[in-house]
Amino acid sequence: MIRFDTGAVTEIALLAAHCDDLAIGMGGTLLTLAAAVPGLRVRALVLTGAGTERAREEQAALESFCPGADLQLRVLDISDGYAPAHWERVKDAVGALRRDGAAQVVFAPQRGDAHQDHRLLAELAPTEFRDHLILGYEILKWENDTPQPTVLHPLPAGIAERKAELLMKHYPSQRDRDWFDEQSFLALSRLRGVQCRARHAEAFLLDKATITFGGA
């Protein structure tokens, strides 16, 4: 398997439609980055949940997934499932996230996601973050939209288990969903691990990147 190295990363931008999308899609990667980069700057935008218990869950969760990081989270109050009807507002919020930060890597939903709110963010991310590495994360849910990933991030078993533990701890509002349990999260990360010869992994989709041959 060919290794892909991003170089030094000191700030990341996170785009999500719903509280818990980020933790489900890339919780292990957040734990890994926070541990590897002291003082990592994390700038996150979530479209739904402002003023509700879900937003409080998200703040506490991201603090746990990004220990020691300089975390800034903005949660909007757009209704679940209606983000496309608020295209201009979402576009402005994504643009503000870009202008107010200096991220080297952007994480957003992947374009093939079955949920319309996720797809909207996937489509808008490259229109604002035009010169950035954008990695599309996958969100486990009941829809049959599991993608064929192009980038895999290996995770130690301990990180995958910690991710599952934190998901169950910080999102009690989701525990009644029949798919929301530790076995589900570990099963998907184990599958992605098999695909890159690791114990566990998280998967991302990469639409476009440049390559340099022969450079340092």
Image (cartoon, helix red, strand yellow):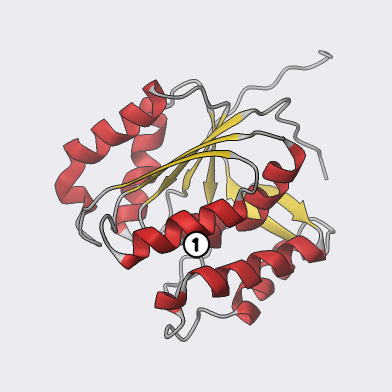
117 relative to 188, above or below: above
Quadrant in which the C terminus is drawn: top right
Mark 1 element type:
loop
Between 80 and 74, the one nearer to me in the picture? 74
Dot 1, crowdedness within 10 Å: few (<14), some or many (≥20)?
Answer: many
22 vs 56, left or right, is right
Q: Is residue 99 above or below residue 137?
A: above
> Looking at the figure, which quarter contains the N terminus?
top right
| Residue plotted at (30% across, 54% down) | 117
Q: Percent from the top left, x then y, of residue 188? A: 64, 70
Q: Residue at x 46, y 65 (%)?
A: 145
Residue at the spot x=19%, y=38% of the render?
89
Seen at 68% across and 73% down, the residue is 186
| Residue occupied by mark 1 | 139
Give x and y (percent) for residue 214: 83, 14
Residue 112 location, quadrant: bottom left
